[in-house]
Amino acid sequence: MSLYYLKQYCIMKKAKRYIIKNILLRFEREIMKILKKFDIVIIIVLLLLSFIPYGAIMIFNINGNSNGVYAKITVNGEEYKIVRLDTHSGVEEFNVKTSKGYNTIKLEDEKIAIVDADCNDKVCERVGYIYKVGQTAVCLPHKLIIEITGEVKETEEEDFIAR
Ligand SMILES: [Zn+2]
């Protein structure tokens, strides 16, 4: 009887091994299938990624944001005028009349400055030319701000598409 059990035991062991082997094989196959699916996903993602820089550049060009530099003039918190600086050439001068007085603003090529004002502190005149994104020229008594920005307003965007 004990021999019979031993045989049975051996068969069981073999069967166990066989089952485990099979499970492992199946598992491996499943993993391979998943990996193959992943391969396809990765290829698709890479393909999509390869298009993104191109698409992004195109969108930026439409918006004029890629290298656009603008001077935003605000008086009393309200937008007065936006001038594109990076494509500007020559000399241009204009007066901004506020309720407290005037500021003469001068555009020279890609730079902008307040060159004259009838404010009491004349701080705005001393700022001189500004042209880098983030720079500001402020006339506190007149509540006038010139801000250099790389952003474009939606109405301006439409303008650029039309051009
Ligand atoms: Zn001033």
Image (cartoon, helix red, strand yellow):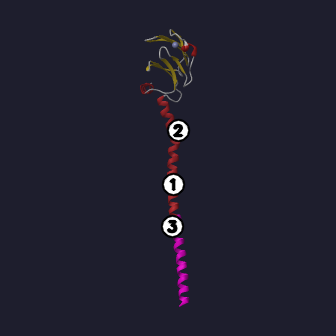
Percent coordinates x, y for residue 99 in the rendering: 43, 12
The response on whether ligand 1 sits within 8 Å of label 1 is no
Q: Foreground residue, 144 or 1?
A: 144
Residue 109, placed above or below residue 12: above
Please state, as top left, top right, bottom left or bottom right, where the C terminus lies in the image: top left
Question: What is the number of the mark on residue 118?
Answer: none
Q: Foreground residue, 115 or 48?
A: 115
Residue 100 sits in quarter: top left
Three-letter code, disc 2? Pro
Span shown in magenta: 1-28
Question: What is the number of the mark on residue 53?
Answer: 2
The residue wearing badge 3 is: 26
- Whether tag 2 and tag 3 are in contact, CB under 8 A, the answer is no
- Spatial CA distance of label 2 from label 1 is 23 Å
Q: Secondary structure at mark 1?
A: helix
Main secondary structure of the magenta stretch: helix
Q: Secondary structure at mark 3?
A: helix
